[in-house]
Image: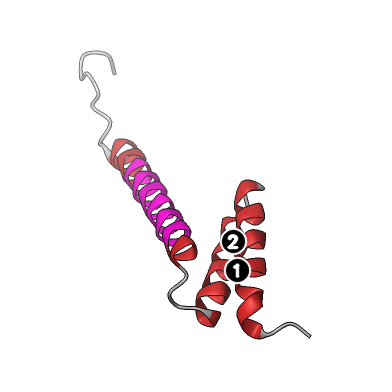
Amino acid sequence: MLEPKSHQSAYYQRGLLKLKSGDEDGAKTDFYEALRIDPNYAAVQQELVSLIRKQSIRSTSERNSAMADFEERSKPILRNPFLT
């Protein structure tokens, strides 16, 4: 039977495959599991930091876009009194 330490690479590799297939949450779970086994696994640390930054940037961008849309929709409609 494999020692738990040897599983770290399997979790890392599976996380990379999930990341490439678009499953960011699954990849993050596998990366965290690899780090639980070996907290000093530098490659996993780098992938995880990169993924978290990417998600944070996307989240911020989506939030800003939603806020701009809300503000645009919330503006009062200005009517020309001569056209009513």
Quadrant location of residue 7? bottom right
Please give the label number shown on residue 30.
Answer: 1
Question: Judging from the image, what secondary structure is the residue with disc 2 in?
Answer: helix
Locate residue 45, reporting x and y percent.
Answer: 43, 65
| Residues in magenta, as a range | 46-66
Q: Quadrant of residue 52?
A: bottom left
Q: Residues within 10 Å of mark 1 (few under 14, many from 20)?
A: many
The picture places residue 53, in percent across and down from the top left corner, at: 37, 54
* 69 over 13 or under it: above or below: above
Q: Is residue 65 magenta?
A: yes
At label 2, counting other C-alpha atoms closer than 10 Å, the crowd grade (few under 14, some 14-19, many 20 or more) is: many
Question: Residue 75: horizontal and vertical position, in percent?
Answer: 26, 37
* Residues at circles 2 and 1 in contact by the CB criterion of under 8 Å: yes
- Does 79 appear above or below 27? above
9 or 77: nearer the viewer: 9
Q: Is residue 64 left or right of residue 54?
A: left
